[in-house]
Image (cartoon, grey):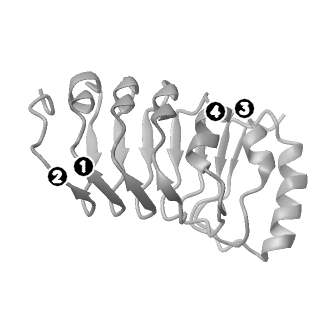
Amino acid sequence: KLKSLRLGNNFLRGHSSRVYDLSQQILKNLVNLEELDLSSNFLQGLVPDKLFEMTNLKFLNLGNSGMEFGSRDVLSQVTFELSSLKMLDLSNSLILGSIPSEIGLLTELTSIVLDSNDLTGTLPSEMGALVKLKELNIRNNFLTGKIPTQIGTFLTQLNSIVLDSNYLTGELPSEMGA
């Protein structure tokens, strides 16, 4: 059974309803998929619901794919339904809303890339539970408030933190870089 489907950086195109229908058909047969990369394509339409039934996914890259999440609270859905994820890239995906505190439940994550969306609110302190995280990129959003001290205290594996082009305030936590 297929474990990896990487189609990123192509010129794949598709109109919303046809892509959605086709994706639903394809994804229903790929329940054992562990890696899915559709990034940097020209797909249109909503991300298929079947994606959130792929509970074995460890690597998910839909960054700049052209697909949309609509009004769905995608980060909450990912948190509760794709808990095995190690790498998540939803950059440039028109995601609205805040980062849910439940993001801390994704304890296997090593990389999270949510740059260039419309994320608002604060960075949840629960991100401190992501102790395996090596890359955190949430640049170019509308985040406000302070950087939680938990990011510096508990995320000792972090190699890269990219939070520029937001509206963060306060002092840099002294725990960062320790």
Q: Quadrant of the C terminus?
A: top left
Pointer 4 or 1: first along the chain: 4
Disc 4, SS: helix
N-terminal of the two: label 1 or label 3?
3
Residue under the image location 11 percent in, 42 percent down: 172
Q: CA distance from mark 4 to mark 1?
A: 25 Å
Name the residue rendered at 83%, 41% in the picture.
30
Three-letter amino acid code at disc 4?
Phe
- Separation (CA) of disc 2 from disc 3: 37 Å
Q: Which residue is mark 3?
A: 55
Chain-order first, disc 4 or disc 3: 3
Disc 2 or 3, which lies upstream in sequence? 3
Q: Nearer the viewer, mark 4 or mark 2?
A: 2
Which residue corresponds to mark 2? 169
Left/right of residue 98 with respect to residue 78 in the rendered view: left
The amino acid on which the numbered mark 2 sits, given as a three-letter code, is Thr
**Residue sitting nearer the eye, 70 or 5:** 70
> In the depicted view, which residue is nearer to us: 97 or 105?
97
Q: Which mark is residue 80?
A: 4
Tell us which disc is closer to us: 4 or 3: 4
* Residue 84 on image: x %, y %: 61, 28
Q: Residues within 10 Å of mark 1 (few under 14, many from 20)?
A: few
Report if the CB atoms under discs 1 and 2 are less than 8 Å apart.
yes
